[in-house]
Image (spheres, grey):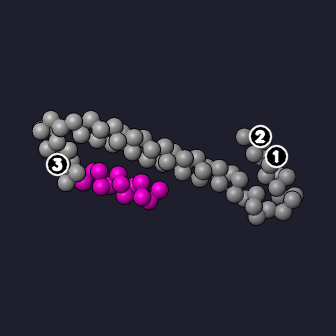
């Protein structure tokens, strides 16, 4: 996850944007490939962020089950089933 965000940070740097602008100005064929890669990286980062939110939500509900005794688990599961 950290590497993904590091890559996104690098893409947002002025140096990177300047190189892409120079390639666009030169009408390089690499710009099309760059846009595809940039879009795929951004989509993957957004999906990873959504997955992390989902996992934290699951942990909030199911985390207490790991530290409960059997009676507490039964009560907690009853609560979860009613949601």
* Crowd class of label 3 (few under 14; some 14 to 19; many from 20; radius 10 Å): few
- Residue, x 84% and y 63% (percent of image)? 69
Could you tell me which residue is drawn at 77 percent across and 40 percent down?
A: 82
Q: Quadrant of the C terminus?
A: top right
Q: Quadrant of residue 20?
A: top left
State the residue position of label 3. Answer: 18
Q: Earlier in the sequence, mark 1 or mark 3?
A: 3
Give the residue number, with chain letter if any, for mark 1. 78
Secondary structure, mark 1, is: helix
Tell me the CA gap for discs 2 and 3. Answer: 55 Å
Bin the neighbour count of mark 2 within 10 Å (Cα to Cα): few under 14, some 14-19, many 20 and up: few
Q: Earlier in the sequence, mark 2 or mark 3?
A: 3
Nearer mark to the viewer, of 2 and 3: 3
Specify start and end residues of the magenta stretch as a single range. 1-13
Contact between labelled residues 3 and 2, with CB atoms less than 8 Å apart: no
SS type, badge 3:
helix
Q: Is residue 5 left or right of residue 19?
A: right
Taking depth in this image into account, of 31 and 2 the one nearest to the observer is: 31
Q: Nearer the viewer, mark 1 or mark 3?
A: 3
Does the segment drawn in magenta span residue 6? yes
Residue 80 location in percent, x, y? 75, 45
Q: Residue at x 16, y 48 (%)?
A: 18
The answer to whether residue 5 is above or below residue 43 is below
**Residue ID for mark 2:** 82
Q: Disc 1 and disc 2: Cα gap in Å?
A: 6 Å
Mark 1 and mark 2 in contact? Answer it, CB < 8 Å.
yes
Q: Nearer the viewer, residue 59 or 43?
A: 43
The percent position of residue 22, horizontal first and vertical second, equals 14, 44
Give the left or right position of residue 47, taking residue 14 as reference. right
Q: Main secondary structure of the magenta part?
A: helix
User: What is the x, y in percent for residue 2?
Assistant: 44, 59
């Amino acid at each position: 996850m950290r590497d993904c965000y590091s890559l996104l940070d690098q893409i947002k740097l002025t140096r990177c944007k300047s190189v892409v602008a120079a390639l666009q100005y030169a009408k390089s064929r690499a710009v099309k490939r760059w846009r595809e890669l940039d879009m795929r990286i951004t989509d993957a980062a957004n999906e990873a962020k959504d997955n992390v939110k989902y996992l934290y939500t699951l942990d909030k509900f199911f985390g207490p089950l790991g530290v409960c005794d059997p009676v507490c688990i039964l009560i907690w599961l009853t609560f979860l089933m009613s949601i």
